[in-house]
Amino acid sequence: MNRIEKSSSVSARWLRAALLALPLLALQLVVSQALMDAGYTTGVAFAQEKAKKNQQETRRTPALRNKVYERLSEAQAFIETKEYDEAIEVLRKMEEAGGKRKLNSYELANLYNLFAFVYYSQDKYLEALGEYEKLVAQPDIPLAMEINTRYTIAQLYFVMEEWRQGVDALHAWFDVTESPSAQAYILLGQGYYQIKDYDNALKNTLIAVNMYKDKGKVPKEQWYSLLRFLYFEADNIPMTVTTLEEMIVYYPKKQTWVQLSHMYGESKQEAKQLAAMETVYVQDLLDKGREQITMAYLYLNADVPYKAARVLEKGVGDKSVEDSSRTLEILGNSWRQAQELKKAIPVMEQAAAKSEKGELFCRLGSVYLDNDNFKKAIAANRKGLKRGGVKRPDSCQLVLGMAYFNTKNYAGARKAFKEAAKDKRSRKYADQWVKYMNNEIDRQKKLQEDA
């Protein structure tokens, strides 16, 4: 696996984890705000019923009698002072009344509304939900009252994490309302997200976002987060990128820049991928080891090994990046590619010492050879081969043979080249070295004979 493949693999796993985590947080925030916006006040519903004319149905709503109004007001007074037991007692007596005191459907609806509020105030959501269900079951109640209550029912299902029931309740609300809000569509989209119906989640989330845009308003950050996730889940990379690009304009946070960088990588826009990640790095915001390693990979992929080395050197130095064998290997290779051999060698020595396999010793041996440290090259390659776990033993034998040759240990070199030639990938090169070595030995003999 080359540098680019490794970088893409790391990025994809990290990005997917990040995207999976965000929408759940968004849902909790939006539902909580919706509950506040819904108007959970102690005001009795009958006191202010101002439905718009275009929401009216031909309903003959029964009258609210003065004595009933007075008893409901009495219960409300107890609610305002948080004397909930006293309020419940008043409401229970009203509910149990018979004869002339028996309540009509509209009076019962207001009664259940107050019951529900008492239970909601005590975090008894299931009981509150039961009272609201009884409210909407009453015939001939004002349409505005039914609309508000059905929306509240849906919200309560979401608070209780009963996602399917919440979706169904929202659809019942959509059936009776003429002007659904963007908040309602986003709530429905989040409900579908929770039951993993991502197609419908995307459809409704997009409606909410576009409704805000059409009014010249900026969609909320949580909406963008959900939309981005849903596009990503649908494998629609171009729209995931577009969503992140819009999001970064209004919410230029570190994590959004990082995710945008990864998505540029997914869409093979390497220059933009590097630029987006570097935007965060130059602000010194990449405080996690995996982020800094990703930054280093991006620099390596862009053939800027010196910057890659500086990123990792700083991270290892301030301990934000673990000085594992793998990290030190990347750092050493970065210095090596930057032609900074004096910096590469000690780092690769540390990397090899921390590794349980011989692979890094063979790579270290190659660095020693490049720096004309032939004895160290021999020692490192022999240690690597002895330890095992070397991906290309033939390459290690080639380096060993060249190191032996440069120390004039021709027997050792011949043996190493012979081992390398057992692998067809190195056979030609090993044979060339053997031929060259034989010619050199013959040349030296002739020089001695002529002396």
Image (spheres, rainbow, N blue to C red):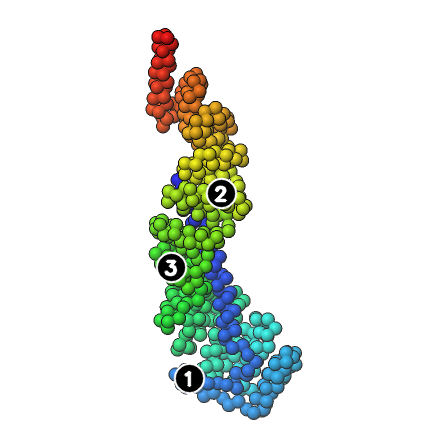
Query: Which of the marked residues, 3 or 2, is nearer the chain's N terminus?
Result: 3
For discs 3 and 1, the disc positioned in front in the rendered view: 3
The residue singled out by tag 2 in the image is 313
Give the quadrant of the N terminus.
top left
Q: Secondary structure at mark 1?
A: loop
Left or right of 178 on screen, residue 327: right
Residue depicted at 38% across the width and 62% down the height: 246
Quadrant in which residue 306 is drawn: top left
Residue depicted at 57% across the width and 77% down the height: 117
Q: CA distance from mark 1 to mark 2?
A: 67 Å
Labels 3 & 2 near each other (Cβ < 8 A): no
Query: Which of the marked residues, 3 or 1, is nearer the chain's N terminus?
Result: 1
* Residue type marked 2: Glu
Q: Secondary structure at mark 2?
A: helix
Q: Secondary structure at mark 3?
A: helix
The residue singled out by tag 1 in the image is 52
Query: Which of the marked residues, 1 or 2, is nearer the chain's N terminus?
Result: 1
> Where residue 383 appears, x then y in whole percent?
50, 27
- Give 15 or 131, whichever is nearer the viewer: 15
Give the quadrant of the C terminus.
top left
* Residue type marked 3: Glu
* Residue type marked 1: Lys
- Give 143 or 357, whichever is nearer the viewer: 357
The residue singled out by tag 3 in the image is 245
Q: CA distance from mark 3 to mark 1?
A: 40 Å
Disc assigned to residue 284: none
